[in-house]
Image: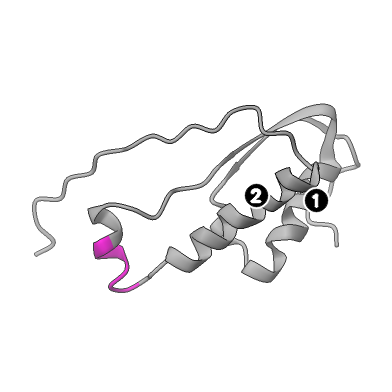
Amino acid sequence: MTIFKRRAGAFQWLAVKSLHHVPVPLMGKALEEIHRVLRPGGRAYIFEPVYAGQFNEILRLFNDEKEVRQAAFDTLKDAVSRGDFALKDEIFFQSKSEFGTFA
Protein backbone atom coordinates (compact mmCIF):
# COMPACT_ATOMS: atom_id res chain seq x y z
CA MET A 1 0.00 0.00 0.00
CA THR A 2 1.39 3.39 -0.97
CA ILE A 3 0.02 6.39 0.86
CA PHE A 4 2.59 9.01 -0.04
CA LYS A 5 3.14 9.71 -3.71
CA ARG A 6 6.86 10.02 -3.02
CA ARG A 7 9.83 7.83 -3.68
CA ALA A 8 11.44 5.85 -0.89
CA GLY A 9 13.83 7.96 1.15
CA ALA A 10 12.33 11.24 -0.01
CA PHE A 11 12.27 12.94 3.41
CA GLN A 12 14.89 13.73 6.02
CA TRP A 13 12.23 14.91 8.50
CA LEU A 14 8.55 14.09 8.77
CA ALA A 15 6.03 15.39 11.31
CA VAL A 16 2.97 13.27 12.02
CA LYS A 17 0.10 14.56 14.12
CA SER A 18 -2.79 12.45 15.32
CA LEU A 19 -2.19 8.92 14.12
CA HIS A 20 -5.44 8.12 15.92
CA HIS A 21 -7.36 9.59 12.97
CA VAL A 22 -6.09 6.75 10.75
CA PRO A 23 -8.43 3.72 10.81
CA VAL A 24 -7.08 1.27 13.40
CA PRO A 25 -6.50 -1.58 10.89
CA LEU A 26 -4.32 0.76 8.79
CA MET A 27 -2.21 2.34 11.56
CA GLY A 28 0.62 -0.16 11.15
CA LYS A 29 0.61 0.31 7.37
CA ALA A 30 0.72 4.08 7.85
CA LEU A 31 3.84 3.74 10.00
CA GLU A 32 5.39 1.40 7.42
CA GLU A 33 4.79 4.07 4.79
CA ILE A 34 6.35 6.76 7.00
CA HIS A 35 9.37 4.50 7.42
CA ARG A 36 9.54 3.93 3.65
CA VAL A 37 9.67 7.61 2.72
CA LEU A 38 12.23 8.53 5.37
CA ARG A 39 15.87 8.62 4.34
CA PRO A 40 18.23 6.33 6.23
CA GLY A 41 18.89 8.18 9.48
CA GLY A 42 15.84 10.39 8.86
CA ARG A 43 13.62 11.46 11.69
CA ALA A 44 9.90 11.31 12.27
CA TYR A 45 8.37 13.58 14.88
CA ILE A 46 5.17 11.82 15.88
CA PHE A 47 2.85 13.38 18.38
CA GLU A 48 -0.32 11.87 19.68
CA PRO A 49 -2.68 13.33 22.30
CA VAL A 50 -3.04 11.38 25.53
CA TYR A 51 -6.60 10.60 26.54
CA ALA A 52 -6.84 12.37 29.89
CA GLY A 53 -8.37 15.42 31.48
CA GLN A 54 -11.63 17.30 31.59
CA PHE A 55 -11.66 18.11 27.87
CA ASN A 56 -11.95 14.40 27.09
CA GLU A 57 -14.83 14.08 29.55
CA ILE A 58 -16.73 16.56 27.39
CA LEU A 59 -15.49 15.18 24.07
CA ARG A 60 -16.47 11.61 24.90
CA LEU A 61 -20.13 12.62 25.08
CA PHE A 62 -20.21 12.79 21.28
CA ASN A 63 -16.85 11.37 20.10
CA ASP A 64 -15.09 9.03 22.51
CA GLU A 65 -11.50 8.67 21.25
CA LYS A 66 -10.16 6.61 24.14
CA GLU A 67 -9.82 3.34 22.20
CA VAL A 68 -8.38 4.83 19.00
CA ARG A 69 -5.86 6.92 20.91
CA GLN A 70 -4.74 3.83 22.83
CA ALA A 71 -4.51 1.89 19.56
CA ALA A 72 -2.31 4.63 18.07
CA PHE A 73 -0.04 4.61 21.12
CA ASP A 74 0.18 0.79 21.05
CA THR A 75 0.96 0.82 17.31
CA LEU A 76 3.80 3.29 17.92
CA LYS A 77 5.18 1.22 20.79
CA ASP A 78 5.07 -1.92 18.64
CA ALA A 79 6.92 -0.20 15.78
CA VAL A 80 9.67 0.90 18.19
CA SER A 81 9.84 -2.58 19.76
CA ARG A 82 10.31 -4.16 16.31
CA GLY A 83 13.10 -1.71 15.52
CA ASP A 84 11.21 0.07 12.73
CA PHE A 85 11.84 3.32 14.58
CA ALA A 86 14.27 4.27 17.34
CA LEU A 87 12.78 6.21 20.23
CA LYS A 88 14.95 9.29 20.71
CA ASP A 89 12.77 11.00 23.27
CA GLU A 90 9.29 10.73 24.70
CA ILE A 91 7.76 13.93 26.02
CA PHE A 92 4.46 14.28 27.80
CA PHE A 93 3.06 17.75 28.36
CA GLN A 94 -0.18 19.26 29.56
CA SER A 95 -2.08 21.89 27.70
CA LYS A 96 -4.67 23.78 29.71
CA SER A 97 -7.99 24.56 28.06
CA GLU A 98 -10.77 26.53 29.67
CA PHE A 99 -14.31 26.93 28.42
CA GLY A 100 -16.61 29.45 30.08
CA THR A 101 -19.78 27.99 28.67
CA PHE A 102 -21.15 25.93 25.85
CA ALA A 103 -24.53 27.68 25.99
User: Which quadrant of the figure has residue 7?
Assistant: top right
Residue 22 position (above or below residue 80): below
Number of residues whose C-alpha sits closer than 10 Å to that of mark 2, classed few (under 14), some (14–19) or many (20 or more): many
Q: Give, as a single range, the part of the protein colored magenta.
A: 57-62
Residue, x 85% and y 31% (percent of image)? 39
Residue, x 65% and y 27% (percent of image)? 88
In this rendered view, identify the residue nearer to me: 6 or 63. Answer: 63
User: Which quadrant of the figure has residue 61?
Assistant: bottom left
Residue, x 32% and y 74% (percent of image)? 62
Mark 2 vs 1: CB contact within 8 A: no
In this rendered view, identify the residue nearer to me: 48 or 10. Answer: 48
Quadrant showing the N terminus: bottom right
**Is disc 1 placed on a helix, strand or loop?**
helix
The answer to whether residue 13 of the structure is visible from this angle is no
User: Which quadrant of the figure has residue 38?
Assistant: top right
Name the mark nearer the viewer: 2 or 1: 2
Q: Which mark is residue 4?
A: none
User: Where residue 37 sits: x, y (%)?
Assistant: 83, 41
User: Where residue 69 sits: x, y (%)?
Assistant: 50, 59
Quadrant showing the C terminus: bottom left
How has the structure been colored for display? Answer: one colour
Magenta stretch encompasses residue 11: no
Residue, x 85% and y 44% (percent of image)? 36
- Distance, label 2 to label 1, CA atoms, is 13 Å
Number of residues whose C-alpha sits closer than 10 Å to that of mark 1, classed few (under 14), some (14–19) or many (20 or more): some
The answer to whether residue 70 of the structure is visible from this angle is yes
Q: Which residue is mark 1?
A: 33
| Amino acid type assigned to the residue bearing label 1 in the image | Glu
Q: Which mark is residue 76?
A: 2
**Is disc 2 placed on a helix, strand or loop?**
helix
User: Where residue 4 sits: x, y (%)?
Assistant: 79, 50
| Amino acid type assigned to the residue bearing label 2 in the image | Leu
